[in-house]
Amino acid sequence: AEKSADFSTLEDMVEEAKQYGSIASFGKPSLDADSLSHIISGLASSLTTSRTEMTELRTGELRQVRMDIVREKLHTLDSEGTWKNYAVDDESRYVQRFWAWTFNERRTGDFVEIVSRRCMRCYSEDGLQSCPVCNAAFVCWGCFREGDAFANHRASNNGVECECGSLLGRVAMGSLEYKDEEQLPSFCIAVKDQAFGEGAERIVRKVRFLDPANGDYIGPVMVAKESRFAGEYHTQMAYHKNFMRTQDIAASFGRRFNDALDEAEKYFDDAASQACIRGLPRILFIEPMVVELIENGVEKNILIERYLVGDYKKVR
């Protein structure tokens, strides 16, 4: 190309694509073989990377990228864009339940349901009273004043175990666990429609917990992770299961590493070495959860975890 040629429009198109997280570049070729070779080589490398990301490793088949993803520009404010609320007072969109992950005695692991801190009659989260027997069922203050709110909860029916006994059994077996308000501030959430990040496997959206009383944002900023690929998106729990199992295994290695550092201090007598060991960084993994949502009668599941502010770097 001539040096005087104006490629500003093409250069602007590349910069705009980068603002949405795409890998883009503009090559201004000279009239020689080396320049053209460099550009073609870069294009071939990019196409090979994309094809590899889209290939299912187990079958070798190409995966179909979802076409329903709306992205936002980098550094877009949370106040910009649109959010979708899943709240108690919305019968068409609400949170069904939360799931965490736990290992059993065989270390195979599985989902564990989180105790719902909502009134079992009206689903309110205000002024909750817990069942004094199982501590896994709740009624709000309004329903509690109407009478013995837990009578049916603790009553057996034709020899069938009562709900209270069933919840006690699930807690004992490890398939049901409790999380306090610091770990899980609310059972109402808002999910941003626009994705703000994307990797080779997943897209990422912002998520906030909602105060059920007034709809204000509460608790930490969270992110929701979903698959980029259509087939995996429709088998979400199986997809999230692989992620949560891998995350928990990695966290167990991190705990062993931290324990080894703590143990190493006793092998040194001088204060300087001990202080150096105490100052070494420890490895911590964020605990993810899966949110089971109902939207217009259809169930969908998203994996959420705490949002970490900063630049992300992948270390291989």
Image (tube, rainbow, N blue to C red):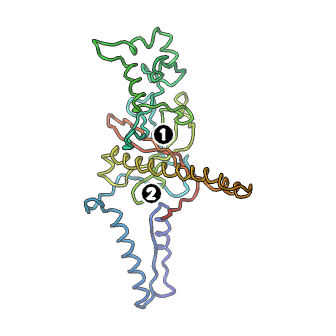
Residue 248 lies, in percent from the top left, at: 45, 47
Residue 229 lies, with reference to residue 47, above or below; the image says above
Q: Is residue 96 visible?
A: no
Give the residue at x 41% y 51%: 246
Query: Which residue is the extreme one toward the top?
Result: 147
Helix, strand, or loop for circle 1? strand
**Dot 1 alpha-carbon crowd within 10 angstroms: few under 14, some 14 to 19, many 20 or more:** many
Residue 10 lies, in percent from the top left, at: 46, 73
Tell me the residue that label 1 is attached to: 190
Residue 161 lies, with reference to residue 90, above or below; the image says above
N-terminal of the pair, mark 2 or mark 1, is 1
Q: Amino acid at mark 2?
A: Glu
| Residue 216: numbered disc | none
Q: Amino acid at mark 1?
A: Ala
Tell me the residue that label 2 is attached to: 198
> Which picture quadrant has residue 30?
bottom left
Residue 184 lies, in percent from the top left, at: 52, 35
Residue 160 is left or right of residue 5, and the answer is: left
Quadrant in the picture for the N terminus:
bottom left
Residue 183 is left or right of residue 229, and the answer is: right
Front disc: 2 or 1: 2
Q: Nearer the viewer, residue 240 or 260?
A: 260
Q: Nearer the viewer, residue 146 or 242?
A: 242
Residue 170 lies, in percent from the top left, at: 39, 27
Helix, strand, or loop for circle 2? strand
- In three-dimensional space, the C-alpha distance between marks 2 and 1, rounded to whole angstroms, equals 19 Å
**Dot 2 alpha-carbon crowd within 10 angstroms: few under 14, some 14 to 19, many 20 or more:** some
Q: Is residue 298 visible?
A: yes
Q: Are marks 2 and 1 in contact (CB under 8 Å)?
A: no
Give the residue at x 33% y 54%: 229
Q: Nearer the viewer, residue 163 or 141?
A: 163
